[in-house]
Amino acid sequence: METSRSKQPRPGSPRTSGSQSIALGLEHIGLISLRFPLLVGLVAIVLLIAAGFGLARIKVDDSLSQLFRSDTPEFKTFEEVTRRFPSNEYDVLIVVEGKNLLERGSIEKLRDLVTDLQLVDGTRGIISMFSARQPPQGDALPAPLFPDQLPAGAEYDQLVQRVKNNEIIRGKLLSEDGQLTLIVLALDPAVVASSRLRNVIGEIQKTIDDDLAGTGLTARLSGVPVMQLEIRNAVERDRLVYNAFGFAAGALIAILFFRRLSFMIIGAGPPLIAIVLALGALGWLDFRLNMFLNVMTPLIMVISFSDSMQLTFAARDRLLQGEGRFEAFRNAMLVVGPACVLTHATAALSFIALQFSESELIRTFGEAGLVATLIAMFAVLMLVPLLGVLLLRNESVFAAEVKAADTAVDVLRRFCGWIAAKMVSHPGLYSLLGLLVVGGLGLIYANLEPRYRLADQVPDREQAVAASHRLDAKLNGANPIDVLIEFPKGKSLYDPETLETIAGVHATFEQQPGIANVWSLETLRRWLAEKAGKSDVTTLKQYVDILPQYLTRRFIPAEQDAVLVSGRVPDVDAGQLLPVIEGLDKALDQVRVKHPGYKIAVTGLSAIAARNSALMIKKLNRGLTLEFLFVAAFIGLAFRSVVVMLASILPGIFPVVLSGTLLWLIGEGLQFASVVALTVSFGLGLSATIHFLNRLRQEERPDQDPAIAVERATVLVGPPLILTSVVLACGLIVTVFSDLPSLRLFGWLSAFAMLAALAADLLILRPTVTFLSRLARQMSRARLHRLEREH
C-alpha cells in the first residue's frame, strides 16, 4: 500500500455540473439560507412561535388497549363490551395485605375505609368482602356477612371461619390464607377520561393512608385507571428527561470536539429547533403521546443531529483550508447535502414500513415519524448554513488557532486511516467473513419467538404492577377475561334457555385451567339455590333488581339483551396465555352447538393480546426483512449503482441480526418495542453507510485502485461518522431512565444497534465495497475486451 494513501487528504470538491445528484438536487434547499439569511431566520422564528402553541396542544394517550386498536372483528367486540359493560376499564383495584388482616381491629378499620372510599368524589360504587351476605332466612332479605356490631372472642373466631368459607368471596375477594383482600372501587368514566383522574387517585390514596395508619396492613392500587395514570405520568416525565439529557449529551460531545461554542450551536441548534418544530407540528395534527410516540424526541434529535454534524464537520474542514464562511457552507451543502437528504429518505422509508402493521398505535407512530423526519430534514438543511453565516466571524483567526490544536479530530482520522488500510488489504477475505458472520447471526435471529406481557406497557417501578403481581399470586389472576353472550331475537334474560346457556358458559369458564375468579349471573343463581333452596326465576329477578346498578351493569346491560361472564387470568407471556384462550374457545363450542341462536365470544384485553400479539410481531418482523431489500434497492437506485446496492445490504442487516442475537442470549424474545426499535434503527443506522458512499462517489478516480478512494473517503468522513454514531447512541440510551419497560427496551436496543451499525460500516462496508468495485471493474474490462475482439 502506498504511503501517500495514508496521508490526510483535502476535503472532496463539490460535484461538477455534469454529475447527477443522488438527492435529485433537493440539497439546494439549504442554499436559500445563504442567499436570504435574514428572511429565513424570520420565518424560523415565526414557525417556532407557532410550534410553541402546538406543543401546548399535545395530549397523552394512556389507553392500555391502544397497541391492539384495529379494524378487526375481535377488537370491535372488545370495544362493544367496554361500551356496554364499562366495569374493568374504570375499576381501581385496592389490594390490602397483612398477616393480621382478619383481626377484629383490622376489620373495623377496613370497614371504615370502604365507607370512606364511597364518599370520594368521582366514585360510583364499591365491591368488597363487606358486600357479602349471609344465607337468606325465609322470605327476608339476607343479612350482611359482617354484622354492624362485630362479636368478640369465640364468636368472632366463628365469624372469621364463615368469612373464609364464604363461596362468594373466597378466592375472589379474599385469599385462601385470609391475608389478602381485594376492594374494587368503580370510578365515573368521565373522571377516567379527564385530567381529574390524578386528583381522584390522589384522594383515594390519602384516604387509604389515613384509615389504615397504624394497622400494619399494606395497601397498593392497581387496575386500568391507576395504570393509565402511571403511564400518563411516566410519559410526561420522560418527555422532560429525554429533551434535557438527549440534547445535553449531543451538545457536550459537540463542544468537546469542535472546541468552539459557536460550532456547538451550529451543530446542536438545528436538532433542538427540529424537536420543537416537529413536536409542535404533531400537536397541531392532533397526535397523542403514547409509549411509542414518547421516543419521538430522541428520534428527531438523532436523525437531525447526525446530518447536522456531518454538515458542520464539512464546513469546518473547508474553513481550515482558508475558505470564507459563505463559501465553506455552500460547498459543504453541495458535498454533504445529498447524503443528508438520502439519510432522511431512508429513515422515512423505515417509518413507512410501519404502516403495514395491523396495530393502529404502530401505524400512528410511523406517520408521526414520517412527519418528524421531513421536518428534521428541512430544519437541518436550512438552519445549519443559516447559523453558520450568522455566528462565525474572523474565519482566518479560527483556522490558525484550530490547526495548531485539533488533537481530537486528528486522533480519529488516524484511527480511521488505520482501520481503512487494514480492511482494504484483504477485501475478499473480510467480505467473506462478514457474509458468514451475518449469515450465522441471521440463523439465530430467525429463531427468536414473539413475546408480549401487559405489564411491559405499564411503569414497573410504581405500585400498579406490584399490586397485580400480588393478585396473581394470591387470587390467581389480575387481568380480566370475558365471554360475551348475545341473545337471539325473542329470547329474554330470564328465558329458561338463556339461563341454561349462561350456566353452561359459566361452568365451562371456571373449569378451564389457568382461569380463576369467575363471576356472572350464574354466581347469584347458584348461591340462591344452595343457600336459600330457591331456583325460581321470580326470586332471581327480585335479587337482581335489589342489587346496586353499578354491580348488575357489570354483567347485564340496560337493554338486557346480552350478559357477560367474567374471569381473571395472571399476567403472563401471551405465548403461555394463548393455549388457555384457545382451549376455552374450543370448549365453548359444546355450548354453541347446544344453543345455536346465542352468539358466544371470548374477549377482553388479555384475549386480544394473546391472539394478536404473536401474529402482529411476526408480520412486523417480515416487514423488516422486506425492508432490507427495499431500502438497499432504493439506495442503489439513488446512486445508480448495483455495487452500492449490494454493498449496503450486509452492513444494513448486521446491526439487526446482532441485536436479535443479543436478545436471544439474554432470554428475551421479539417484543413490539424491540421490532419497532430494529425497524427504525435499520433506517437510522444506514446514515453512516450513505454518508460514506456519498463521499466515496466523489473520491473515486477511474485510473486508481478503488481501495485508494475507500481509504481517502474513510479518513474524510470517519471522524464525523464515529462522532454522530456516539451521539445517536447517547440520544437513544437516555430512554433507560424511563419507568416504562417497553421504552427502556427500545432505548438500549436502539443504542446498541447504532453502535453495531458503526462497527458494520467500518469492518464490513469498507472491504465489501472495495471487493465489489474491483470485481465490477474487472468484469467491465473483460466485457470491453470481448467487444473489441468481436469488432
Image (cartoon, helix red, strand yellow):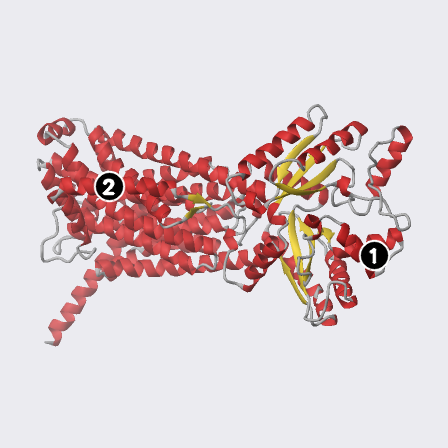
**Residue 448 in view in this figure:** no
Element type at mark 1: helix
Q: Give residue 485's position: percent from left, percent from top.
A: 68, 63
Please name the residue shown 64% across and 49% down the image. Answer: 87
**Quick one: label 2, few (<14), some, or many (20+) residues within 10 Å?**
few
Amino acid marked by disc 1: Thr
Q: How many marks?
A: 2
Residue closer to the observer: 516 or 719: 516
Please name the residue shown 20% across and 48% down the image. Answer: 337
Residue closer to the observer: 668 or 312: 312
Please name the residue shown 68% across and 25% down the image. Answer: 213
Quadrant of the image occupied by residue 276: top left
- On screen, residue 151 versus residue 747, left or right, reads right
- The correct choice, above or below, for 410 with respect to 495 in the image is above
Q: Which mark is residue 539?
A: 1
Residue closer to the observer: 241 or 683: 241
- On screen, residue 310 versus residue 601, left or right, reads left
Q: Give residue 588's position: percent from left, percent from top.
A: 70, 64
Mark whose residue sits in front, 2 or 1: 1
Q: Residue furthest top?
A: 214
Separation of residues labelled 2 and 1 (CA atoms): 71 Å
Element type at mark 2: helix
Quadrant of the image occupied by residue 263: top left
Q: Give residue 502's position: percent from left, percent from top.
A: 74, 62
- On screen, residue 503 versus residue 718, left or right, reads right
Q: Which mark is residue 332?
A: none
Quadrant of the frame with the C terminus:
bottom left
Instruction: Identify the residue under disc 2.
Output: 46
**Residue 413 in view in this figure:** yes
Q: Give residue 702's position: percent from left, percent from top.
A: 13, 56
Amino acid marked by disc 2: Val
